[in-house]
Image: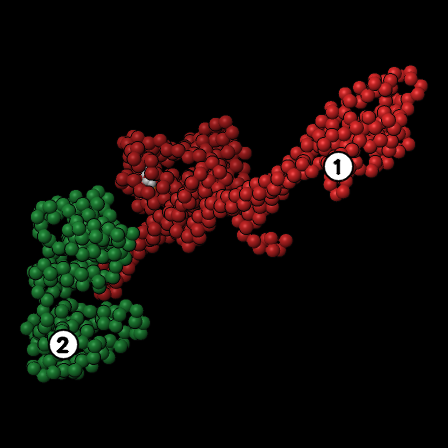
Chain colours: A red, B green
Amino acid sequence: MRAWEKLSLQARLGLLYAVLLIFSVVLVGCYSYWNIWQLFINNKSSHLRAQAKPIIEHWLIDNDLAKLDNPHLKLNPQNAFILARDLTSRDTVAIVLNRKGDIIANGKRLPEEPEAPIPDKRYFRRALSGENEVTYRGQVNGKPVLVMLIPLRPQPASSRIFGVIQMSTLLTDIKEILFRHGAMLVSLVAIILILGIVTGFWLIGVSLKDLQGLLTSCDRISKGDFSQRVPVKNRRDEIGQLAISFNRMMEKLEATFASQQRFVANVAHELMTPLTGLRGSLEVLLRGAQDDPSAMARLSKGMYKEVNRLIRLCEQLLGLSQLESSSNVHKQPIILSEFFNEFKADVQMLAGGRSLTIQQGPYVKVSADPDLLKQILLNLLSNALRYSPTETPVVISWKLLPEQVEIRVSDQGQGMDAETLSHIFEPFYQGKATVVSGDKGIGLGLSLAKSMVEAHEGTIRIESEPGKGTTVSFTLPLE
Amino acid sequence: MGTDENNNKMTILVIEDDPVITEFLCTGLKYEGYEVTPKTAAKAGLDALQQATFDLIILDVMLPDIDGFEVCRHIRDRGSDIPILMLTVKKEISDRVKGLDSGADDYLTKPFCFDELLARIRALLRRSGKIRENKKLQAEAIVLDMETREVSRNGKRIDLTPTEFGLLELFMRHPHRVFTRETLLNRVLGYDYDGGTNIIDVHISHLRNKLGDRPPRLIRTIYAMGYAFYPEETGT
Ligand SMILES: Nc1ncnc2c1ncn2[C@@H]1O[C@H](COP(=O)(O)OP(=O)(O)O)[C@@H](O)[C@H]1O
Ligand SMILES: [Mg+2]
């Protein structure tokens, strides 16, 4: 078993295939050999029978033995010899036996005629008990013979058996034919085996070569080359299918990897701008601007802004990474109207003096993480406030849908064009909208909101018209 | 702040949308004696370029209205050969070739060192023939050779340590400017030197001795502030 497992797949398959092939071909060979042999024997015995039948019938009639009511059914050497003689030919010899099994007459006369084998008691008894045409194989002087025992009865189906004829015929010719046939069979089997095994190994090798290709690709991928694809030769077979799904998997992986890389690059890029401001301001201060109080004030205010920007970025990144694991989402039943009553107080500060309306909708209980829900709303609200003129209202409302509730945040600000809308949820994507009030965004707000909504199995969508305003709606599952 | 050695100041147009970066660029460059005009968008920058002449442009790649490379090409298409220094973020480094292709003369990757920025600006101005870098600084019969780093007063050689040389150079480059001890410390010993400022007093007194600087001094102690360099002809 150990050695078997140590073999390569190709060797194992090849060996298994060869053994199966040898086994089946040899089986077929033996069967056909045996079959032909049987055919010959049957042929020979029916030939004997056909030869003997009319002779015996004539003989019965000629000797007045065919009558059922004849009380003296008896063999005498004379008539028995005539019968034996008639039944004997160049390759067949007949002897006649009485009921006791004694040889009464032997048909062999000429030297070229074959010898009769010594009767076999077992078969003789079967013939005597009424079995027609007992056939068996025997040997005379080392030569194979076919022996047939025919019971003698006055008429067919009569139970009065008064003797048995033993006819025997040489099988040497059949043997010879069979030998030639066998030799041919063996060479054929050998040729088939050689061809079969060679093509088998070749076929296995070819199929496994595709697997080998898969293996080399995997190797390269593990070294970091995600652009690797496996060539697909035959799309129907299993290896082809494997290659296809492998390639599909790689496409997904490569895309994920690329987006991950893009994300990291974007983060670095987003970090660089505030860091540039910080470093530059610090250097300018240290080189001497610190001696000028007004420059000092301006630069430190700028640095304070940049630091806040960095903190905001980190917070949002943390938020995104937290959502990767569902264990960070703590859902609980929330009554929306109560939630918003509390939320309004928190958010009034963010709105500054602006008109922020919360339109109470129907009584609903949702299943959500209150902190996340607050963050979603804060992100959407800060966008609405940031990108709409101070005198326009911002409205939060909700309505009941089958099995879920839809919460909407709408403003009457700048809106967005289709191009912006199509990218809006990409991390770090920022549209052309100008900031009306508050800080400049980072471009993570909406992608973060989307992730948070999706963590609740909800959906988020945006309707917007340039110049008219924007409505962001998201759904939450009901309790 | 104090005036600089040459009265015809170099003018720089800064086109950058980030307010904090613009702020430190303006403050820092003004301190170094440049005249700076900040613009936060490409269009405004191009307009300013038509109304006045500048000696150099500092141009951010990521601008809200027009891409920085595009702006660069615009300026070149107008036939101007004004030196342009581009500011990029690492992500765009593969765009470097594009930047130089579009006609920029040099580029700097954010976040950059202010000293490096100054060096690049000086190099660009020199290359375009706008300034001739003085190999020797002279005042009060003191000669400072920037190349050989040799100092002499009235033809007599004076041996200075690198720190003393740095202090003297700073004073001579910015006569009349009052430097606090902190600033002097930062400029000659580096931003990350974390000893006390007393060391500056020690260096200054060595420098005065070596120069034979007696009251009324060239290098004056300004009470509660720091030190300043007053060449004789403009004395108190
Ligand atoms: N209510 C809105 N009105 C107009 N534009 C919006 C609105 N909300 C978002 N946007 C656009 O979508 C972009 C991406 O939004 P977001 O992901 O929140 O990033 P950020 O607000 O930090 O820039 C914004 O830069 C802005 O151009
Ligand atoms: Mg936002």
Residue B193, x across and y down, in percent: 30, 71
Q: Quadrant of residue A302?
A: bottom left
Image-based side of A175 in relation to A244, left or right: right
Closer to the camera in the image, B98 or B166: B98
- Mark 2 element type: loop
Residue A20 visible, this orientation: no
Residue at image mark 2: B148
Q: Is residue A226 left or right of residue A146?
A: left
Which mark is on residue A447? none
Horizontal and vertical percent position of residue A342? 46, 39
Image quadrant of ligand 1 equals top left
User: Taking the image as drawn, is residue A213 in sight?
Assistant: yes
> Which element type, helix, strand or loop, lies under badge 1?
loop
Residue drawn at 78 percent across, 33 percent down: A109
Residue at the outermost right position: A71
Q: What residue does disc 1 label?
A: A111
Q: Is residue B149 above or below residue A179?
A: below
Q: What chain does badge 2 belong to?
A: B
